[in-house]
Amino acid sequence: MKYLIVGLGNTGEEYEDTRHNIGFTILDAFADASNVVFTDKRYGSVCNVRLKGRELILLKPSTYMNLSGYAVDYWMKREKIPGENLLVIVDDIALPHGSFRMRPKGGAGGHNGLLHINAILGTTEYARIRIGIGNGFKKGSQINFVLGKWSSEEKLFLQKRIPVIIEMIKSFVLSGTELTMTAFNKLGRPAQEKEDTPRQENS
């Protein structure tokens, strides 16, 4: 069984370690943890991870964010991957920094990468993990904010979240969307919201 795991971002050194490239950051960490290396192929950088008999194709599109749909469509067709085995990882300014949640489907929420994927695939029926980058910007400076680099404090906090998100991706492959949302979305809630709920120990 094959799965396509897509991390959205922009190619080029100027975009490295930027908020908008969180999808690339997650897949880079996943590849490092799995001891695999990305290679440049058509429409993006690709590597393969084996997980309990499943094949995960990790894709970082090289089309730039607003044309991501071309890369997703190409690799889904090339590898004959059904829509239910597609997972897209994307930044979200509507969520607090470091929070994350999985959704089984939905609109683009103004995100150009998701907009293009929806348009090219002709559907919004695919899973996505939205990772919060916050909205700490003044009116009119959204572009500079999302294309800006993480502060040292933000980066440190993010490093603590990345291993959890990697496990979330694995759970999607092994257990499906619904069980993954039940198990992980509560872990991705903002810290302030967590303080108002009973603490649960993770096994």
Image (spheres, helix red, strand yellow):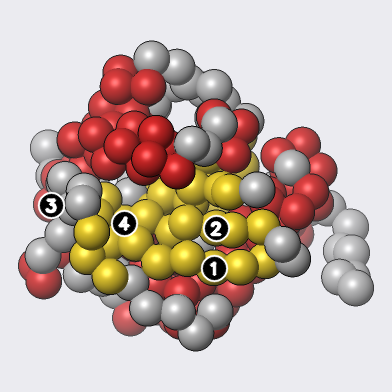
Find the distance from the CA under tag 3 to the CA under tag 2: 33 Å
Which residue is found at the position 24% from the left and 34% from the top? Answer: 70
Crowd class of label 1 (few under 14; some 14 to 19; many from 20; radius 10 Å): some
Q: Which of disc 4 and disc 1 is earlier in sequence?
A: 1
- The number of discs equals 4
Q: Which of disc 3 and disc 4 is earlier in sequence?
A: 4
The residue labelled by disc 4 is: 60
Identify the image quadrant of residue 168.
bottom right
30 or 58, nearer to the observer: 58
Crowd class of label 4 (few under 14; some 14 to 19; many from 20; radius 10 Å): many
Crowd class of label 3 (few under 14; some 14 to 19; many from 20; radius 10 Å): few
Mark 1 or 4, closer to the camera:
1
Which residue is found at the position 28% from the left and 32% from the top? Answer: 69
Give the answer, above or below, for where 93 lies relative to 155: above
Find the distance from the CA under tag 1 to the CA under tag 4: 14 Å
Find the distance from the CA under tag 4 to the CA under tag 2: 13 Å
**Mark 2, secondary structure of its residue:** strand
Find the distance from the CA under tag 4 to the CA under tag 3: 22 Å
**Circles 1 and 3: CB atoms closer than 8 Å:** no
**Mark 1, secondary structure of its residue:** strand
101 or 57, nearer to the observer: 57
**Circles 4 and 3: CB atoms closer than 8 Å:** no
Instruction: Indicate the amino acid at tag 2.
Output: Leu
The residue labelled by disc 1 is: 49
The residue labelled by disc 3 is: 144
Pinpoint residue 102: horizontal percent, then vertical percent. 61, 42
The residue labelled by disc 2 is: 56
Q: Which of disc 2 and disc 3 is earlier in sequence?
A: 2
Instruction: Indicate the amino acid at tag 4.
Output: Lys
Q: Which of disc 3 and disc 1 is earlier in sequence?
A: 1
